[in-house]
Image (spheres, helix red, strand yellow):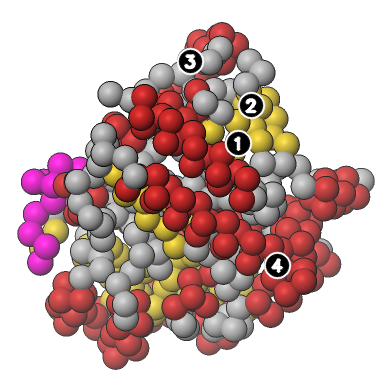
Amino acid sequence: MDMTKSEALHARGLKVMVEGVSSASRGPAAFGRAPQYMERGEGKYLYDVDGNAYLDWMMAYGALPLGHGHPAIVEAVTQAVVGGTHTATAVEIEVELAEMIVAMLPHVDKIRFANTGTEAAMAAFRLARGHTGRRKIIKFEGHYHGWWDAVLLNSNPHNPLSLGHKSNPVHIPDSSGLTPGALEDTVVVPWNDFDALERAMALHGRDAACVVTEPVMANFGVIAPKDGYLQRMQELCREHGALFYVDETVTGFRLSPGGCCELYGLTPDIVTYGKAIGGGMPVAVIGGSDEVMSGLEWGKVLHFGTHNAGRLSLTVSKAMLTTMTANDNAGFKHNMEIGQKMAAAIGDVLRGQNKHRAICQGVTSMFQIFFTDAEEITDYRDFCAHVDRVKYRDFALKLMDRGIYMTPGSTLHSLPSILHDEADIAHTAQIIAEVLEAWD
């Protein structure tokens, strides 16, 4: 694959940007080399500056359920931009979109718009503390809730010998620049472990403002919750007076029309959304019950933002939801079906060869390949102990050489758009089979 122009751009970028890119997941930290610089996206394809084309299974980390440049999005932006890019005032589109969102989510009475998942989570944690008058946050190993200081720990892969005992995990900060005070009220618990959850709630539940969870563990590929686990978590929160906070930044408006709360029958006190809700634009949502969300009134719990509810972004979001929900949620149903069929096809390929030990895990539209000797990856510690991250990266790069674009990060995942079809499944499965067969 020719990367002459991408490599030249990366060399230029290194002179003026850290790592030559604006996020570590896009640069050499993830790729192990210069990344491809993309020129454009069209439908289900990406095209780089060297003229290479890729069938895109990353879809901007799940932010593009309609694919690249969908006509409904293009038309919405074209019409809206004539009226200006942003007013920083109340606008009609925010009421219209909020009505759509609340109508789709029976567990949400009111919402507030933000720009990113991190911003929404920051507001949600502050709201939980303001509502309960408590300080502690209970989070889980391997779960990511943005890069706010208080929860920026135990969400990166580490040597399994450094994690400590499951009953008392070692706190491992994910970044330099964090003060001990920022982390002292955060309790870390192994996920998908009923006993660990019960023990943590017995010890800390009465002091916890909230328990926050990814409903499907999406920061380490795709790891589904055990049967009854999220429901028990919700019960324990009610018993101890802690708010149940479901972070659907990754899973919301993706795994089903109502996200994981619909899939698993959850009624959280607070829920946040990002990525897919924006349809490719920066939109995030904080939602919850009337009682909890009223804490944001009049700045009792502070939440400001010049760019909150940007009219262009909300216009795109409305166009995306209108398209996805048409014909009885046909867009959502399509993506869920294609994701499940792609995961099944990959699983068939992996079981049909004996050169490489690997499995594929998925939940509706999301799927990920793990190079591992394990039969299943069920939590963070499984991942750290049994998943070969370097091998997955090298595998993803080999797929790119064959025109299949999947993230090179084993902690991330793949998913379709409404434009992917069964021919794409068959083609991708064939390329995967050929790559594995030729790879020694």
User: Residue under circle 1?
Assistant: 55
SS for tag 1? Answer: strand
Precedes in sequence: disc 3 or disc 4: 3
Q: Amino acid at mark 1?
A: Leu
Residue 76 is situated, as x and y percent measured from the top left of the image, at 84, 52
Identify the residue position indicated by label 2 in the image: 53
Q: CA distance from mark 3 to mark 1?
A: 28 Å
Query: Would you say the residues marked 4 and 2 are in contact, meaning their CB atoms lie under 8 Å apart?
Result: no
Disc 4 residue type?
Ala
Q: Secondary structure at mark 3?
A: helix
Mark 3, residues whose alpha carbon is within 10 Å: few (<14), some, or many (≥20)? few
Neighbours of disc 1 within 10 Å: few (<14), some (14-19), many (20+):
many
Residue 290 is situated, as x and y percent measured from the top left of the image, at 57, 85
Q: Amino acid at mark 2?
A: Ala
Q: Which residue is mark 4?
A: 330
Residue 165 colored in magenta in the image = yes
Distance from disc 3 to disc 2, alpha carbons, whole Å, reads 25 Å
In this view, the mark in front (3 or 1): 1
How far apart are labels 3 and 4 at the CA level?
44 Å
Residue 383 got which mark? none
- Where is 170 relative to 133, above or below? above
Identify which residue, 270 or 184, lies in the foreground: 270
- Where are the magenta residues, as a range? 158-167
Q: Circle 2: is it few (<14), some (14-19), or many (20+) Cα within 10 Å?
A: many
Q: Tell me the distance, in whole angstroms, between the alpha carbons under discs 2 and 1.
A: 7 Å
- The residue under label 3 is 14
Q: Residue furthest front?
A: 352
